[in-house]
Amino acid sequence: MVEEYGQGVLLPHAEFEALWKESEENRKAVPIGVSGVVAERCDIEVTLADNQLRTAYVIDVNQLGKGLQTWSIPLQGIGIDRATVTPQGGNERGARLGRLPGNEGLVVFLDQPGSHRIRLETQSPAVRSGRRLLFSLPLMNVPSGRVRLTLPAGMNIWSDSGERLSDRVEGDNRIVEWIPGEGLCWEANLSPADEAGGQAAKIRSWTETTLVASLIDGHLNWQGRLQIHPLGEPLQQLKLRIPKGFRLIDADAEGLTEWNVSPVPDEAESELLSLRFRQPIRTQITLEISGIVVNPAAGEWTLSSFRWEDGSPQTTRCVLAYEEYNLPLITATEGIRLEPMGTGRTTIDGITEDTDDGVKLRLLRFVPANGDFSVRLRLPESSERFAADILSHTKLEP
C-alpha cells in the first residue's frame, strides 16, 4: 500500500521494533561523533484556509552510514496526514514512520546513503478566541530553512517577536516569508486578524496558561502559570478576568510593579486582575499568580477558565492535586475531559505538587476545549469514599 499510494503511515509495532534493532546495529558502524543521518535544511509551507492550518515540512537530510538508518523528527503532539521520502535522483515513495515512546517525536527509517528529501503534511484547526484567530506552529532545530505562510487577502499577521512580518500579495492571497533565528528551535505563535476590520491593534498577546489546584486538608489552593507572548506591539499593562471565587493572594513576574483586583461591570461571576509593568514587555515573560478558592455554603468548589478583558478564554490546561484516598467528587463539568495522572511527588511545569509532610497526592488533568471549561467538586462523605476510589483508577471521557 505504501509503495502504490505514496502515503506515509505509522508502522505496526512489531515491524517498528525489527527495523529499530537493525538500524541500531548499523549505527554502531558509523564513526564516533557522527550521526547516521544529518538534517541540513527544513522549509515549512503553511496555508490558512477555512480556519484550517495545512502545514508541509520539507526536510533535506543526508544519510552517512550504510544500511538501515534512523532520523528522529522533533515534532510532538501532531498527527501526520501524509509522509513521503525522495532519494536524490530517485522517485518519491511513502516514508516508513514510527512514533517514539512517550510521544516525544517521530522517527523515519532510511536505507540508502546520500541525500533525501522528506515531506511531512499535517492539518490542524486554528483556534478562535473572541475575535482573534490563533495558531501555534511547531518548528524544528535544523541549521537552515525558511517559513512561507499563505493567508487569505485582507488579513494581517504578527510574529511573537513583536515585529510585523514583511509580506506581499499574490492574486487573492497574502504571502508571508521569514527566516527564524536559532535554527528553527522554538514555537512561533502567530495571530492573523481582519485588517479591513481594524482588529490588528487589538491583537495584544498570546498566552499559554496552566492552572494547578491543590485540595489538601479541606482547603483548595490554586496557582496559575501564564507564559505571555506579546504580539505586534509591546505591552505595559495586562487585564485578566479571574473567577470571582478565586481569592488572589500573590502575583509575580519580572518587571511587575503593581496589581489589583476590581469588579467587572455587568459581570457577577468574574473579577478583573489588572497588572502594570515597569517597562513595556517585548519578549515572552512568565506570570505566576496564586490564591485560594472560596468554598460556598453549598460545600462545592468551582474551577473555571481565566479570561482576557474581552472575555476570550485563555486556559490551556488545568491540574487538580488531592490527597491519596480522598478523591473529591466531580459534580458537574463543562468543556473538558478528565484523565487521572498517577500518584507521588510530581512537578507540573515547575510547580511542585506534594505536601511538606510527605503525603502522597493523586492528580487529575482537565483538558479544556478551546480554553474554556468549568468544574464543580466537593469532598465526599465517608459513605461515598469507596465509589470515589474506584473512579480514581478510571479514565473519564467527556
Image: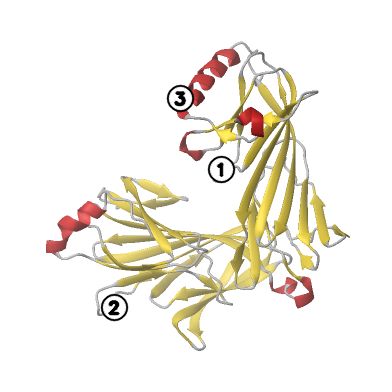
Q: What is the residue that sits farthest to the top in this orientation?
A: 29
Q: Position of residue 287 (x, y in %)?
A: 54, 62
Q: Position of residue 272 (x, y in %)?
A: 51, 78
- Compare residues 257 and 269 and report the one nearer the observer: 269
Q: What is the residue that sits farthest to the bottom in this orientation?
A: 266
Element under disc 1: loop
* Tag shown at residue 243: none
First in sequence: mark 3 or mark 1? Answer: 3
* 120 w.r.t. 368: above or below: above
Q: How many other residues sit within 10 Å of disc 3, few (<14), some (14-19) or many (≥20)?
A: few
From the image, tell me which residue sits under label 3: 14
Element under disc 3: helix
Q: Position of residue 149 (x, y in %)?
A: 76, 53
From the image, tell me which residue sits under label 2: 296
Q: Position of residue 41 (x, y in %)?
A: 75, 35
Q: Nearer the viewer, mark 1 or mark 2?
A: 1
x 64%, y 58%: residue: 135
Here the colouring is: secondary structure
Q: Identify the amino acid type marked 1.
A: Gln
Horizontal arrangement in the rendering, residue 273 relative to residue 189 (left or right):
left
Q: How many other residues sit within 10 Å of disc 2, few (<14), some (14-19) or many (≥20)?
A: few
Image quarter for residue 234? Answer: bottom right
First in sequence: mark 3 or mark 2? Answer: 3
Image quarter for residue 189? Answer: bottom right
From the image, tell me which residue sits under label 1: 76
Q: Identify the amino acid type marked 2.
A: Pro
The CA span between labels 3 and 2 is 54 Å
x 36%, y 56%: residue: 397
x 25%, y 50%: residue: 357
Q: How many other residues sit within 10 Å of disc 1, few (<14), some (14-19) or many (≥20)?
A: some
